[in-house]
Each structure stands twice: as C-alpha cells, then as structure tokens.
Amino acid sequence: MADETKSDTNSETDATEGTGGSSAVEAPAKPKAQPKASKKPAPTKKPPQPLPPWKVLLHNDDQNDMLHVVESIVALTPLNAHDAVLRMKEAHESGVALLLVTHRERAELYVEQFQTKRLIVTIEPAE
C-alpha cells in the first residue's frame, strides 16, 4: 500500500507538473529564442551600385550600305528606325556616332553582335 500511496502522490505531482510544469518549461524557452534572434548582426551590405557607363560607338565604313547599317542597328539595339537612321547618318558624315550608353558587359556584347553583321563598333568608358 505504501507503493500505491507513493504512486498516487506521483500522479498528483505529474498532473500538477503537466499543467504548471509545461508552462514553466515554455516560458524560459521563448526568451532564449528571442535573444538569439536579436544577437544576429544587422546586414552591413551596401545597396547595389550602378555599373559604370560605357559608350557604344558606331564607325563609318565603305563596305556596308546604309540600309544594312540601319537594319542592323534596329535589330541589335533598342533604337527605333528613325533613331537608327540618325546614328547611321552621323557616322557616315563624321566618321563615328554614339549608338547608346550601357554597362561594360552589355557594351562588349554589342561589339560582338555588330561584328557578326560586319559593322565596326567600339566601346569606351563614358565620363
């Protein structure tokens, strides 16, 4: 019987711990989680900076006709036909025309694309 009394006492203790003990266990757990989250350092990364601009320059040549130049400009750049004609005429009359300004990687891509059309395009840093 002493064993039964002991188990009854344990049952009462278990029942008490089940309600009161579980909240006592949860209460310290929540504050521990919050300090961990607040201890993380704030991100120190700078916001992305714009890439340095590069000029894409179209050079005059005597090998390509004007229509081919205009069609190539329209096909490879965001310029419309009217702007392409103006750039082509400028290159024809002065020897070089500014097509557009973009970042270096895209400017290099334009050089390669215009080479496939047999047109001379160079790039230089925009100041």
Image (cartoon, rainbow, N blue to C red):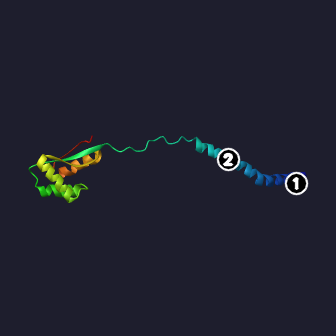
Q: Is residue 2 left or right of residue 18?
A: right
* Residue in the image at 73% along x and 51% along y: 23
* Residue in the image at 67% along x and 47% along y: 29
Tell me the crowding category of disc 1: few under 14, some 14 to 19, or many 20 or more residues within 10 angstroms, Cα based: few
Residue type highlighted by circle 1 = Glu
Numbered circle sitting on residue 16: none
Measuring from the top left, give residue 76's x and y in whole percent. Answer: 23, 55
Measuring from the top left, give residue 46's x and y in whole percent. Answer: 44, 41
Measuring from the top left, give residue 120's x and y in whole percent. Answer: 16, 47
Q: Which residue is mark 2?
A: 29
Measuring from the top left, give residue 69's x and y in whole percent. Answer: 15, 55
Q: How many marks?
A: 2
Q: Which quadrant of the figure contains the N terminus?
A: bottom right
Secondary element type, mark 1: helix
Q: Which residue ends up furthest to the right in the rendered image?
A: 1
Q: Is residue 14 visible?
A: yes
Q: Which residue is mark 1?
A: 4
